[in-house]
């Protein structure tokens, strides 16, 4: 029998973070999922004595636009590996003076301004509605904040992440509109991850790494590309330190409700679920509708 790859904690690296230094005993795992291919191979290994799977969201070499990312495959792949918690890192722009470049915001709310994304595993004869009022796992978010403190990274626990379609950045009119909404940071990727992680009953939290002020800021035009890249590089280094601390602090068992998010979500009469849909969603909802599959891949 082929060796089974397994991980308990998933790490998603965003712009500037395409690998995870310190990850030992690594192997590349390429998965076949019911939703296609993930962004890249999962790098599975050991970090601080814990089984971790790392995925570069945009692929190594940054090959994928935000709208080209197969979010369903990425999250389903983590589920196949046995992951229960995901810590996501992404580069963002700041919409508030208080969130300075180089600082991290551990967002706990999202606003959706995307238009071309698939944000659910469901459909094709199976309807489910998960609660999403609190879109991140408070337990993982709190651990991320503690990890930032231990790593000496200035951070804030709580804030709203506005997700735009991209790949273009905002106009000044849009940026000022978003500021009037009280939004904290702006990015292009994390909302779909959060929605799909909730449907997959995985704990999820975002660390939004501020690279610059969005175009609303009067000093925006004086910021050079070189300065932004320098902040991006520094953020990636800090993120690796934060992840190491977070992984070390992560409890081995979950006390949150993320693992039962689908318990009352399905609306469809089980007898009316098409066989092909039942099979495709076996890993996601099998324990509730029958045909549960064990995690792990060869």
Image (spheres, rainbow, N blue to C red):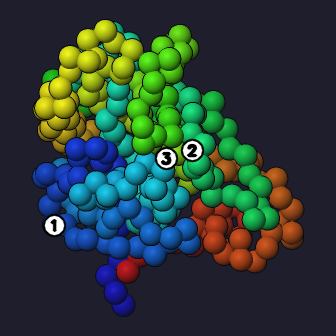
Quarter of the rendering containing residue 74? bottom left
Q: Measuring 20% from the left and 21% from the top, which residue is drawn there?
A: 223
Q: Which residue is mark 1?
A: 25
| Category of crowding for the residue at label 2, using alpha-carbon neighbours closer than 10 angstroms: few (below 14), some (14–19), many (at least 20) | many
| Category of crowding for the residue at label 1, using alpha-carbon neighbours closer than 10 angstroms: few (below 14), some (14–19), many (at least 20) | few
Please, what secondary structure does the residue beneath circle 3 have? Answer: helix
User: In the image, 83: left or right of 48?
Assistant: right
Q: Measuring 51% from the left and 40% from the top, which residue is drawn there?
A: 165
Q: Which residue is mark 3?
A: 193
Q: What count of labels does the image hold?
A: 3
| Category of crowding for the residue at label 3, using alpha-carbon neighbours closer than 10 angstroms: few (below 14), some (14–19), many (at least 20) | many
User: Which mark is in front, 1 or 3?
Assistant: 3
Quarter of the rendering containing residue 187? top left
Q: Measuring 57% from the left and 44% from the top, which residue is drawn there?
A: 195
Q: Which residue is mark 2?
A: 195
Q: Earlier in the sequence, mark 2 or mark 1?
A: 1
Give the Cα separation between the discs numbered 2 and 1. 31 Å
Quarter the C terminus occupies: bottom left
Nearer to me, 256 or 241 = 241
User: In the image, 75: left or right of 24?
Assistant: right
Please, what secondary structure does the residue beneath circle 1 have? Answer: strand
């Amino acid at each position: 029998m082929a060796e089974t790859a397994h991980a308990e904690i998933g790490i998603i690296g965003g712009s500037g973070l395409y690998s995870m230094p310190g990850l030992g005993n690594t192997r590349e795992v390429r998965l076949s999922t019911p939703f296609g291919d993930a962004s890249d191979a999962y790098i599975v290994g050991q970090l601080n004595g814990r089984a971790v799977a790392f995925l570069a969201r945009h692929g190594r070499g940054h090959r994928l636009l935000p709208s080209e990312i197969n979010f369903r495959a990425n999250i389903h792949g983590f589920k196949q590996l046995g992951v229960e918690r995901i810590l996501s890192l992404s580069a963002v722009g700041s919409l508030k003076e208080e969130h300075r470049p180089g600082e991290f915001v551990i967002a706990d709310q999202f606003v959706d301004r995307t238009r071309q994304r698939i944000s659910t595993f469901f459909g094709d004869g199976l309807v489910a509605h998960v609660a999403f009022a609190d879109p991140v796992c408070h337990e993982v978010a709190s651990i991320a904040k503690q990890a930032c403190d231990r790593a000496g990274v200035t951070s804030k626990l709580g804030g709203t992440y506005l997700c735009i379609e991209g790949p273009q950045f905002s106009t000044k009119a849009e940026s000022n509109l978003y500021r009037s909404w009280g939004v904290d940071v702006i990015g292009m990727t994390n909302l779909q991850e959060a929605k799909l992680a909730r449907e997959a009953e995985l704990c999820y939290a975002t660390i939004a790494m501020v690279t610059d002020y969005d175009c609303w800021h009067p000093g925006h035009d004086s910021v050079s590309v070189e300065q932004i890249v320098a902040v991006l590089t520094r953020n990636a280094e800090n993120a690796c330190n934060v992840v190491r601390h977070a992984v070390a602090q992560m409890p081995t068992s979950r006390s949150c409700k993320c693992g039962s998010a689908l318990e009352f979500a399905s609306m469809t009469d089980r007898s009316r679920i098409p066989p092909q849909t039942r099979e495709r969603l076996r890993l996601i909802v099998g324990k509730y509708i029958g045909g549960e599959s064990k995690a792990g891949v060869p």
